[in-house]
Amino acid sequence: MNKFLYVWLSAGLVIGQLAYTAEGDCKPLPDVEGDVLVALVSSDANALLQINFANDEVCTSQSRSPDFDSATSVNFHVNVDLDEIAVQGVVEGYQTWLRIDTEYSGELLLDRATAEGLDLTAAEFLVDNSQLEAAEFFIEYVGSFEIGEIALRNVETNIPLLEVPYDHYVDRDTKPEMSAPEAAFLTVGSIGATMLEEIIIMLDIANHQMTMTQAR
């Protein structure tokens, strides 16, 4: 696998219904500018971390389950320049990259072009949206959303209203000019805090692997 180490950390994301017991030191999630997951990945190249958003804590673990490598794996990457950690997922059959965005409060956010391509915008013209008032997004439900072996149905999704000048990378002043390989990793949406609170993330930074399990 190609690794753009000066900009990207490319890795495998391992998904499975595995149970982990945190060992050692547990602390509140750090209060950092930007995304907390990017900060954690950048903090210690050898860290083995268990991240629980529902409890707002990160625990250092001394060992990882032997089942770790047998779980289903998909890709994830970290782009420090964009302050972004993203995973490869499937939205209504469409395989794409989605940002894990701890600063987004909802479940799922999709940009307008992707939503139109997936035929998710028809409801905007079929119903009375006057109740949206000054809102820039409307809610639609994605029929299927998958990451590895995890499959969710009817995921509440925010989609920008027609002609709303929504730029998925707005205010990212450090965004570099993208070459073709780099542009392939640009995300089209965000997995937000509401969904993250339902899962536990385990990061094995040294081996470039991650697990996601349902919080218990």
Image (spheres, rainbow, N blue to C red):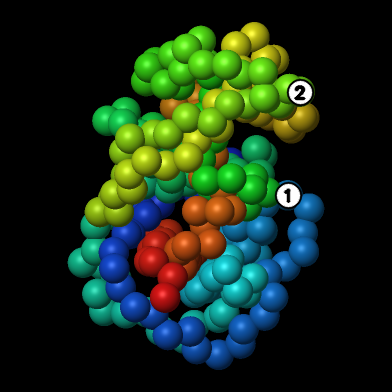
Q: Nearer the viewer, residue 137 or 208?
A: 137
Residue labelled with disc 1: 34
Residue drawn where x is 69% and y is 15% of the image? 165
x and y, in percent, of residue 147 in the image = 33, 48
Residue labelled with disc 2: 134
Q: Which image quadrant for residue 90?
A: top left
Task: Let me know if residue 28 appears in the view.
Answer: yes
Question: On the rendered image, what quadrant is the C terminus found in?
Answer: bottom left
Q: Amino acid at mark 1?
A: Gly
Which element type, helix, strand or loop, lies under badge 1? loop
Residue drawn where x is 51% and y is 10% of the image? 125
Of the residues tagged 1 and 2, which is closer to the observer? 2
Residue with the most extreme left position: 70
Label whose residue precedes the other's in the sequence (1 or 2): 1
Task: Let me know if residue 42 appears in the view.
Answer: no
Which element type, helix, strand or loop, lies under badge 2? loop
Does 13 sit left or right of 86 as displayed?
A: left
Residue drawn where x is 59% and y is 53% of the image? 193
Q: Which image quadrant for residue 104?
A: top right
Residue with the most extreme bottom position: 24
